[in-house]
Image (cartoon, rainbow, N blue to C red):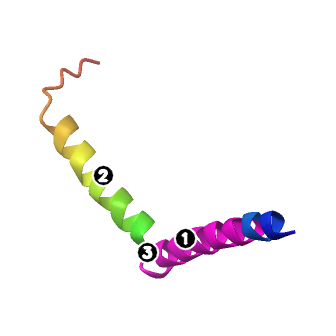
Amino acid sequence: MGKVFKVILKIAAFLAAVVGVLFAVYFWNLDQKLLGWAYVQVNKIFDRKQTDIKF
């Protein structure tokens, strides 16, 4: 019974850590901040390229 309890405790601790990290991302809106930064970086890369638009 001791091994089963240790495994359940490890699973519960892991799930608690995952929930804590996800809550921090949600609370501080980190996903949108990261995507905003990535959007600016991608636009810097593509704005440097010369475009030849012919109609």
Query: Start and end of the magenta stretch?
Result: 8-29
Give the residue type at disc 2: Ala
Give the residue type at disc 1: Leu
Q: Secondary structure at mark 2?
A: helix
**Residue occupying image coordinates x 72% and y 72%:** 9
x%, y% of residue 39?
31, 52
Report which quarter residue 14 is drawn in. Answer: bottom right
Horizontally, residue 4 falls left or right of residue 34, namely right
The outermost residue toward the bottom is 27
Horizontally, residue 13 falls left or right of residue 29, namely right
What residue is shown with label 3?
29
Q: Of the numbered discs in the image, which one, if any, rests on residue 38?
A: 2
Q: Secondary structure at mark 1?
A: helix
Horizontally, residue 53 falls left or right of residue 32, namely left
Picture layout, residue 38 above or below residue 1: above
Task: Judge depth for marks 3 and 1 and give the one in front.
Answer: 1
**Residue occupying image coordinates x 18% and y 20%:** 52
**Residue occupying image coordinates x 55% and y 76%:** 20
x%, y% of residue 24?
47, 77
What residue is shown with label 1?
22
Q: Secondary structure at mark 3?
A: loop
Query: Foreground: 54 or 4?
Result: 4
Which callout, 3 or 1, points at the residue further toward the start of the chain? Answer: 1
Alpha-carbon neighbours of circle 3 within 10 Å: few (<14), some, or many (≥20)? few
Quarter of the figure with the N terminus: bottom right
Which callout, 2 or 1, points at the residue further toward the start of the chain? Answer: 1
Predominant secondary structure, magenta span = helix
Q: CA distance from mark 2 to mark 3?
A: 15 Å
